[in-house]
């Protein structure tokens, strides 16, 4: 039965990887894979020799000797445990997505456009790279990419030049998301799973992530495509909420407050995110109900906008398919973890890989394993890779292994346009060709990834 479950997982994983070729949204195979894996566990419960008790974090090697009722009870407890841990991540993401959509409701991100005062291509490149690096650490790399490419489309006429900027934004956004506990789904998973703390994550990864952004941007600034000045799109003044700046800074501040709340109260991050969402939503409702919320001369449009709840609008626009995908993939990986399959795979990695690469400081996992994880995240989704690593390795909190995994999985996806959520959304927004990105951008992403990895290997000796 274990072999069948592994086969189901492999086929589901393959369908997720081939999402664009199959024209099937990846949430579908993720949900089907999760349901079938747990159904097979329930049907074949009597045949499994071992079980991982997640509540006690112990591998029960005498599971075969348990009675049927005891096995069923343990399976239900394990399923409930994993659902609770997964729900923590999903509720956290729902809160963050809603705050971002509320900011957008008030045109808050239009304020960022005011930072761009130059027509020089190189300066604009650095402005967007730095903004992507900073914004992705606060509102996550996917949202930062959407915001910045939307702004890019409003100021750069030539699409051939614009897609170059988009490629560098992908690299910078993924680099920025890696050093923040709220910057990428994978780092959020490690943070909520008590594998990394905010202070150590920033300490370990800020410099490697910064170099991962700076090196490609620096190389690109010498390329012919970034020489000279841009033709800036002249845009007519558009109706904008007079609270746009206020909501931008309030929303970003509320998200930044979440790690602080966790440090002070020791409560799970989703609790702080719900508090932040409540505060932002309160101000949004107050501002929206104001007659002067919009500076539009059109009174009817203004009143309609004012009487429509910004919270309801924001909730209707969040990425529900992504939430369901995370539910499916995390619960499917939990099925493999419960059977002890991931631990066996981890043991084989420890035995076979160390001689091929340098050992991690005070650890038994080769640097090469983690670097390959980063390369692998460019081909397949980094969420299941990190979810699997959570079940494979048992190193304590803030062990350097977890920080290296956060860096590799977060930044390695930049090497292919389909390797990260930021890349996929940029591909859709600008219709970027896979092979164009492979020829023009991938080598820049690889250079940044490798320089950052070397910097991490140096940085970890300081901790």
Image (cartoon, rainbow, N blue to C red):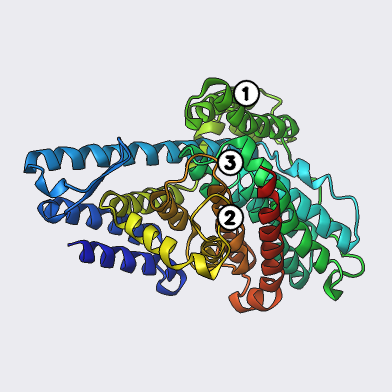
Counting residues from the start of the chain, the first of labels 3 and 2 encountered is: 3
Question: In the rendered view, would you say 248 is above or below 175?
Answer: above
SS at mark 2 in the image: helix
Residue at 74% of width from left, 69% of height from top? 159
SS at mark 3 in the image: loop
Q: Residues within 10 Å of mark 3 (few under 14, many from 20)?
A: many
Question: Mark 1 = which residue?
Answer: 283
Observer-side mark, 3 or 1, equals 3
Residue at 83% of width from left, 44% of height from top? 114
Q: CA distance from mark 3 to mark 1?
A: 23 Å
Counting residues from the start of the chain, the first of labels 1 and 2 encountered is: 1
Q: Residues within 10 Å of mark 2 (few under 14, many from 20)?
A: many
Discs 3, 1 touching: Cβ within 8 Å: no
Question: Mark 2 = which residue?
Answer: 410
Question: In the rendered view, would you say 325 is above or below 442?
Answer: above
Q: CA distance from mark 1 to mark 2?
A: 33 Å
- Say which quadrant the C terminus sits in: top right
């Amino acid at each position: 039965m274990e072999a069948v479950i592994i086969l189901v997982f492999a086929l589901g994983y393959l369908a997720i990887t081939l999402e664009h070729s199959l024209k099937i949204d990846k949430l579908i195979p993720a949900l089907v894979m999760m349901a079938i894996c747990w159904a097979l566990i329930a049907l074949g419960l009597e045949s499994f020799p071992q079980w991982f008790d997640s509540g006690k974090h112990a591998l029960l090697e005498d599971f075969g000797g348990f009675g049927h009722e005891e096995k069923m009870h343990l399976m239900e407890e394990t399923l409930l445990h994993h659902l609770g841990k997964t729900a923590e991540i999903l509720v956290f993401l729902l809160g963050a997505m809603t705050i971002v959509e509320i900011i957008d409701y008030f045109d808050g991100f239009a304020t960022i456009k005011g930072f761009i005062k130059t027509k020089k291509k190189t300066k604009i490149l650095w402005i967007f790279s730095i903004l992507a690096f900073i914004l992705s650490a606060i509102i996550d790399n996917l949202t930062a990419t959407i915001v910045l490419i939307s702004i890019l489309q409003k100021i750069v006429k030539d699409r051939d030049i614009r897609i170059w900027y988009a490629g560098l934004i992908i690299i910078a956004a993924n680099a920025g998301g890696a050093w923040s506990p709220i910057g990428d789904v994978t780092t959020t998973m490690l943070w909520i799973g008590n594998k990394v703390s905010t202070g150590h994550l920033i300490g370990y990864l800020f410099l490697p992530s910064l170099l991962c952004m700076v090196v490609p941007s620096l190389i690109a600034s010498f390329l012919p495509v970034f020489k000279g000045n841009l033709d800036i799109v002249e845009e007519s003044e558009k109706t904008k909420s007079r609270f746009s700046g206020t909501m931008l800074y309030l929303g970003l501040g509320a998200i930044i407050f979440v790690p602080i709340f966790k440090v002070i109260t020791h409560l799970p991050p989703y609790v702080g995110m719900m508090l932040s969402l409540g505060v932002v939503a309160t101000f949004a409702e107050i501002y929206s109900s104001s007659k002067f919320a919009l500076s539009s001369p059109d009174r009817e449009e203004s009143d309609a906008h004012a009487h429509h709840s910004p919270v309801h609008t924001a909730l209707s626009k969040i990425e529900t398919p992504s939430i369901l995908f995370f539910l499916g993939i995390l619960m499917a990986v939990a099925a493999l973890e419960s059977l002890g399959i991931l631990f066996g795979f981890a043991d084989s990695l420890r035995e076979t890989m160390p001689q091929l690469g340098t050992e991690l400081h005070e650890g038994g996992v080769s640097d090469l394993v983690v670097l390959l994880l980063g390369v692998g995240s460019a081909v397949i989704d980094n969420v299941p890779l990190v979810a699997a690593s959570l079940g494979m390795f048992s190193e304590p909190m803030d062990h350097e292994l977890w920080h290296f995994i956060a860096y590799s999985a977060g930044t390695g996806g930049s090497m292919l346009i389909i390797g990260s959520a930021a890349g996929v959304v940029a591909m859709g927004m600008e219709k970027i060709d896979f092979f164009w990105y492979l020829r023009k951008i991938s080598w820049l992403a690889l250079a940044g990834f490798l320089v950052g990895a070397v910097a991490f290997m140096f940085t970890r000796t300081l901790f």
